[in-house]
Image: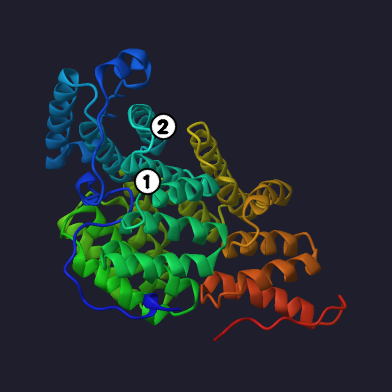
Amino acid sequence: MKAFITFTQQTIKYFFFLMILVAQFSCTKTQKSDNSTVQDGSSNLAIPALFERTGDLAKATEWQKTREKVDELKKKLAKDPNDIKIRLQIVNIYLSEARITGEHPYYYPAVLKILDGVLYLSPNNFEATTFKASVKMSQHQFAEARELAEAARKINPDNAYVYGVLVDANVELGFYKEAIAMSDKMQALKPSLESYSRASYLREIYGDLKGSISAMKLAVEAGMPGSEPFCWSKKTLAHLYESAGELNKAQQQYDDILVVRPSYAFAYAGQARILKVNKQYDKALEVLDKAAKIMPEFSFHEEMAEIYDLQGNHEKALNKYQEVVQMLNEDTKSGHAVDLELCKLYTKAGKIEMAMKHGLIEYKKRPRNIDVNHAMAVVAFKTNDFKKAKEYILIALSTGSKDPELLEDASKIDRTLANGKFGYQPIIVANK
């Protein structure tokens, strides 16, 4: 595993593929078309409106500045509809809003519409192609994202950003060696917060939790304090501490985030997980409710359902699980593929037939992904198909991941096989 194992400290800016500024695509030139193109394809060029923020998010000082900036850009675009640079600036703002507000069902289709307009004006535009690959990644359209990112790489093979998208796509499709190669290339081209975070994720996948934490610390140090990318990095670092059982360090990260960004919902969700571990269930539900009021994130509600189950309130848990199913089904209307999430959700709700249905849909798309195989192993185990459970779990363990839930489920399967009733040799849970 080459460069993603070692790092040098670098001064860098900003984070994550949906938040990168258009100006960072410094290796390509923005293209413009003549006015005849606009007249022939004007229906492709309309700019969707901003989604109005509500609640605490609407009180943030950045919101007024965002509205003013979009108004300014739209006025400029009215004077020159062919200005691709302005269109891409709006894309960048909308992608930032999607991450801050969680309104993905609105923003992703809106951004794709703008990008299709750019690609109408400039079919080989590197920035638009790469942004489109990023959005497809966020919608879990992984194969299409990889195809688009490869097309972008052919246009400009010397831009680090596109290699980040290729890391993500290859990971999700289960091509882990390819992901490492893309990470190495990204690191070589531009050591950055983006490359540190991806290296951290790869280290985690390969069971190097200590190394993953070290890499994510570099990402945090590279972030702009108070920005959403900075908070995302700290949140991810905190979650790594949770996996390592270092709850005090995780709590400190979440507390630090809320000092600089009080409306950061994922920090509240992290605090709630720690409260859940400490069996402070009522307090955890209170904090999760606060997070859910800030952002319509399905995982907050799923966490609530799990806590209701732990409290013994199974009927309330089932109702909450059904609510999450409805949220996920709403997401599908905007092009978001959610079969893996539905598989896991139905498994927790005890609806194994539905879990199997959605799990198989996802498995057919990416049979090499360790998370998909983990989910399928659990479903197979619950249907007493121990042979398939073993096949799935061996793939899930193949990278040496130390994910606590994965190792716990693998141990259950191992113990079942070890009793000798089913005629299979017991598996060895990866623990290196």
- How many numbered tags mark residues here? 2
The type of residue carrying mark 2 is Pro
Residue 38 shows in the view: yes
Q: Nearer the viewer, residue 353 or 176?
A: 176
Image: 69 above or below 156: above
**Which residue corresponds to mark 1?**
130
Q: Is mark 2 on a helix, strand or loop?
A: helix
Q: Do the residues labelled 1 and 2 touch (CB within 8 Å)?
A: no
Q: Residues within 10 Å of mark 2 (few under 14, many from 20)?
A: some
Distance, label 1 to label 2, CA atoms, is 16 Å
- Residue 240 in picture, x, y percent from top left: 38, 71
Label 1 residue SS? helix
Q: Is residue 414 left or right of 408 when viewed as pictured? A: right
First in sequence: mark 1 vs mark 2: 2
**The N terminus - image quarter:** bottom left
Q: Residue at x 20, y 66 (%)?
A: 222
Q: Closer to the camera: disc 1 or disc 2?
A: 1
Q: Quadrant of residue 9?
A: bottom left
Residue 38 vertical placement versus 397 (above, below):
above
Q: In which quarter of the image is the C terminus?
A: bottom right
Give the residue drawn at x 29%, y 69%: 251
Q: Name the residue under label 2.
A: 109
Query: Residue 78 — which label?
Result: none
Instruction: Tell me where residue 284 appears, x and y as whole percent.
Output: 38, 58
- Depth order, front residue of 337/122: 122
Q: Residue sitting at 52 percent across and 74 percent down?
A: 404
Q: Residue at x 55, y 63 (%)?
A: 175
Dot 1, crowdedness within 10 Å: few (<14), some or many (≥20)?
A: many
The image quadrant of residue 187 is bottom left
The answer to whether any part of residue 196 appears in the image is: no
Which amino acid is tagged 1?
A: Thr
